[in-house]
Image (cartoon, grey):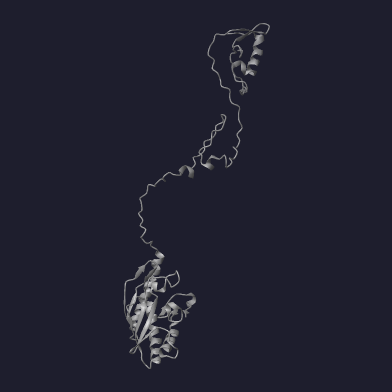
Amino acid sequence: MIRLPPSLARPFLVAALTTPFLFGGAVGAPRVPPVGRVPLPTPRPAVDSASGEAGQSTRDGTAAFRTLPSSPTPKVKPASPAVPEAAPPAPSPKDDPEADGEGEAPDEPGDVPVPSESPTPPSSDETEGKAPAVPDKPRVLTYPDTPVFDPAAATEAARQTVEAQRCEEELKSRGVVFSVGDSISDGRCGVLRPVSVEKLSSGVTISPSTQLLCQTALALDKWVSDDVVPASKKAFDGASVTAISHASTYVCRQRVGGVKISEHSRGSAIDIAGFTVGSRDVPVKIYGSDTPEGAFEADIRATACGPFKTVLGPGSNADHETHFHLDLAARRAGATYCR
C-alpha cells in the first residue's frame, strides 16, 4: 500500500475526484455531486492505460512507474451515446411491407431497440390457394328446391283466402252451382281455391269444367244474368241463351307475343268460344252488323267492358278471331282495356 506525504495527499485527492479515469471509470461517465460529508475512498495508484503500469510519486512530484503483477481487470463496455427518440417516417406504399403482402419489415440498423409491431391479418396474397378455416359450428343443410318462407306473403295469402271464402258465399246466395278445388301452385302460375262452375244463377250451363278465381266466376255470373240473357232474347226473338262453351280458363303460359305471364295463368281469364241460343249454336266470329248474330255479339261485347277489365274478340287481333277473351287484370285506377 502506498502512503503519500501530507504535502501531496490533497493535490492527489483533488485529481482523483476530478479525473475518474484514475479509478478505471469510463470517460464521460456522469459524476455524482457529493452530498454532505462522504467518507473518502482510499486512493490507489494511478494506472497508465497504455502500459498498464502503476505510478509512484516522488518527492519532486514526478511519478515513478513499476510493473504491477498481472491480474484480470474487468472491462467495462462503454455506454452507447443516448439517441434522441424520433417518430419513424411514414412508409411509402412502395416500401410498406403490408401493402404488398411480403411479410414483416426488416430490422432497423443500430442498437436502438425497435418496438415489435402488432400482428396483422394475412393479406389476400398469403391466403390465396389455402382452404378457409371452417368454424366449429353445426352444419345447416339447405336444399335448393325448398321454398323460402315469407311471413308477409303468408299474411297476404291468408287475407286473399278470407276474401275468396266470402266470394264463394256470394255465389251460393245467387244460386250458382259450383265446386271448389284445391289451390294450384306451379311456379309463377297458380289459382287460389279454383272454382268449377256447372250452372250459373240464370240457369245457363258452362262447359267444359272450369278452374277460375271466385271473383272471375262471380263477374261471369253477373254479366250473363244482367246482359247476355236479355241480349239473346232481343236478337233472337225471345230465345234465351242456355249454354256457354269456353276454350280455356286456367292455363300456365305467357301472354301472346310477350314475356309476362297471361291472366290465364292466375285463373283470372276465360275464353268464350260460343253460345247456345234456343236450338241454335252461335260460335264467336265476325258477323255482319245486320244479322241477329252480329247484333247479339256487338251488344254483349260492349256490356262485358266493366264487369271485366279486359275484353278482346273478333277484330281485336288475329289471336282472338274465334273467341272472347275476358279477364280481371288489375290496372291503375281500375282502368279497362276493351278492343
Q: Position of residue 274 (x, y in %)?
A: 37, 83
**Which part of the image, by quadrant, shows the N terminus?**
top right
136 is higher (above) or lower (below) than 172: above
143 is higher (above) or lower (below) than 23: below
Task: Report the residue that reaches farthest toward the bottom.
Answer: 237
Q: For the point 36% across and 85% down, which residue is it?
A: 275
Q: Position of residue 189 (x, y in %)?
A: 38, 69
Quadrant location of residue 55?
top right
Q: Nearer the viewer, residue 141 or 263?
A: 263
Q: For the point 48% across and 43% down, which residue is it?
A: 125
137 is higher (above) or lower (below) than 15: below
Quadrant location of residue 244?
bottom left
Task: Report the residue that reaches farthest toward the top.
Answer: 59
Residue 156 visible from this viewpoint = yes
Q: Nearer the viewer, residue 177 or 79?
A: 177
- Disc tally is 0
